[in-house]
Amino acid sequence: MLIKVEDIIKILESIAPLSWQEDYDNAGLIIGNPNNEIKGILICLDVFPSTVQEAIDNNCNMIISHHPFIFRGLKKLIYNSYTTDILSLSFNNDISIYASHTNMDSCSTGVNYMLANVLRLNNLRPLQNISLQDENYIGSGAIGELLEAMTGKMFFDLIKKKLNLPYIKYIGNINQEIKTIGICGGAGASFLQEAINNSCDCYLTSDIKYHDFLSTEERILLADIGHFESEQFVLQRFQEIIKNSFPFSNVIISQQKNKIKFY
């Protein structure tokens, strides 16, 4: 069966349409030919020159990433820079790169759905007050429930184990019982007030600034669980979507690790 880049795009966008992405985003086909026949697909969170080389080494001529490697407008293409190295490797090896970012964040079976499954949250629903015109759309962030209430410390122990975190940055009473959990994979500090308004006992996201922590006045247990760590499970979702739709075996998840280290 001949499978083209455009076939993969069509199935991905049937689940997470580009119309769901935020205005500032750059999801979609970043580079490549929609008519190219697929030999293999590499799935990753971010694209680096080493990621493109990993695709080449594994006979993959399409990369699906969560984050678009070209995010803002390019004004210059300088030799031996991060962006031009990716472009050069991709063009020279006929590799297509597609990104599904904030549209996959807003998908009801996307980033937050996968994170909720890992953290054993049930009854998933929107964090924001949105119009649910499509049952597959949940918007940025979600709210879920633990099967049984537990202390914040017990929940944090679970998070550290499941997400492989050395520590969690937080504010609030870690000894209080919690059950209603707000989540937003990636940078979701801007939805903190929604978590408070929805009576969440705890809110998990990443990239929280110092004053965002202090603004809670400890009305909620607020935790920064890492950008990479909170979104890593969406890679499995991309793989599931493709394998469930096509009789295609060479769909692999990148060996990429979080480049940010903890000491």
Image (spheres, helix red, strand yellow):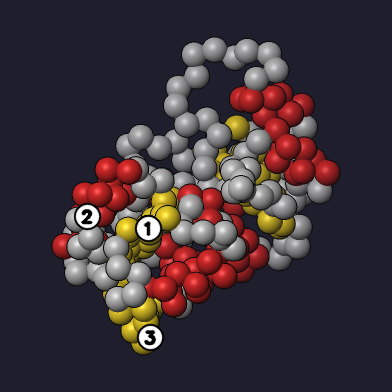
Residue 138 in view, yes or no: no
Q: Are marks 3 and 2 in contact (CB under 8 Å)?
A: no
Q: Identify residue type, mark 3.
A: Leu
In the picture of the structure, the residue carrying the numbered disc 3 is 147
Left or right of 174 on screen, residue 12? right
Dot 2 falls on a residue whose secondary structure is loop
Looking at the rendered image, the disc whose residue lies closer to the viewer, 1 or 3, is 1
Q: Nearer the viewer, mark 3 or mark 2?
A: 2
Verify CB contact (< 8 Å) between mark 2 and mark 1: no
> Residue extending furthest bottom?
148
The three-letter amino acid code for the residue at tag 1 is Tyr
Few, some or many residues within 10 Å of mark 1 (<14, 14–19, 20+): some
The image shows residue 120 at horizontal and vertical percentages of 45, 78
Residue at point 70% right, 33% down? Answer: 49
The residue where tag 1 is placed is: 170
Query: How far apart are labels 3 and 2 at the CA level?
Result: 26 Å
- Residue at image point 44% right, 26% down: 72
Q: Is residue 201 visible?
A: yes
**Residue 231: where, in percent of width, then height?**
50, 55
Residue position marked by numbered label 2 in the rendering? 216
- Image check: 35 left or right of 154? right
Of the image marks 1 and 3, the number of the one nearer the N terminus: 3
